[in-house]
Image (cartoon, rainbow, N blue to C red):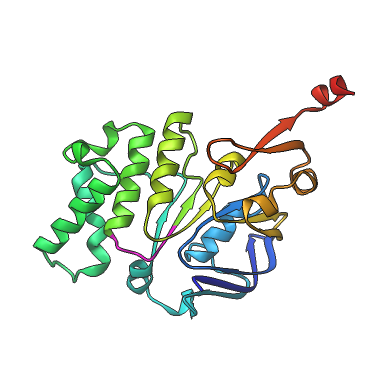
Amino acid sequence: MVFRLEDVSVAIGDKKIIEQLSLQMQEGQLIGLVGPNGSGKSTLLKSMYRFLKPAGGQVLLFEQDVWAQNEKQMAKKLAVVGQETPILFEFTVQDLVAMGRTPHKGLFEMDTAEDEQIVEQALMKTGITHLADRQFSTLSGGEKKRVVIARALAQQAQVLILDEPTNHLDIQHQLQLMDLIRQLPITVIAALHDLNLAATYCDTIYVLKDGELCAVGTPQDVLTPALLAKVFQVTAEISIHPATKKPQLFFLSEQWQSKGE
């Protein structure tokens, strides 16, 4: 078991976003969180990586309370890539990826040959070795996402959390990034806006609405016309993609529904 949440409630100010939510996540999967805007996806993730402390309940990572561990202990287990990655100072790609080694080092400890090898492997796995000497600020959106994922790989965490990883990327870079994420040899938990990406790439999908867990299962089991109508208030038709053999969703607006009648 990677994560286990027991009766977790999260509030921002006076507003409760998550209400007594319980779930379990299995190791070694690409797990998707989906739901309408405001359903609580990002808030749930923030409670899992200790950005927001729950008002009630317990968040367990490998059966240990995340709030009972210090930041260094957590960083050795869990890496996070948020929606935005503001970099306040100029760093090269190489330097940024090398920062992933920080949880494994003492204060003022220099990089070792092993550290350098781990960073090099992270650059290779994410396909950005050729960008190593570039300034981070000069990169495209897709390249920046690859850099922060490379930093997470250099961190050698067992779990990677991604909050809307394809946000602001064009279709080509969305697919390239999801291909990369799919191949990572660790557990990945990602909040995804695009339901077709979730259907194509995820092993298990958790569906949220109004801070509650509505459904859990494989894309085939969860992404049904009935659930999509209930959670997203849309009419959808679903077929199996001939190449991926995964569900492919087609959405109909009220205008097109009326034309079909």
Looking at the image, is 27 positioned above or below residue 190? below
Where is residue 258 shown, x and y percent of the image?
87, 23
- Left or right of 134, for residue 52: right
Say whether residue 206 is left or right of residue 235.
Answer: left
- Magenta extent: 155-160
Q: Quadrant of the C terminus?
A: top right
Question: Nearest the camera: 44 or 126?
Answer: 126
Point out residue 191 in the picture as x, y percentages from the top left corner. 55, 50
- Please check the rendered image and state whether residue 195 is part of the magenta-colored stretch, yes or no: no
Q: Residue 103: where, in percent of width, then height?
A: 27, 67
- The answer to whether residue 63 of the structure is visible from this angle is yes
- With 9 as the anchor, is 168 left or right in this view? left
Residue that sits furthest to the front in the current view: 242
Residue 246 coordinates in the image, percent (x, y): 59, 43
Q: Say which quarter of the image contains residue 114.
A: bottom left
65 or 88, which is in the foreground?
Answer: 65
| Magenta-drawn stretch, dominant element (helix, strand or loop) | loop
Decide if residue 196 is on the left or right side of residue 136: right
51 or 209: which is nearer to us?
A: 209
Q: How many marks?
A: 0
Note whether 71 is above or below 219 in the view shown: below
Is residue 170 visible in the rendered structure shown here?
no
Q: Which residue is at a point 37% across and 59% down the rendered structure image?
A: 185
In this picture, is 2 found above or below 132? below
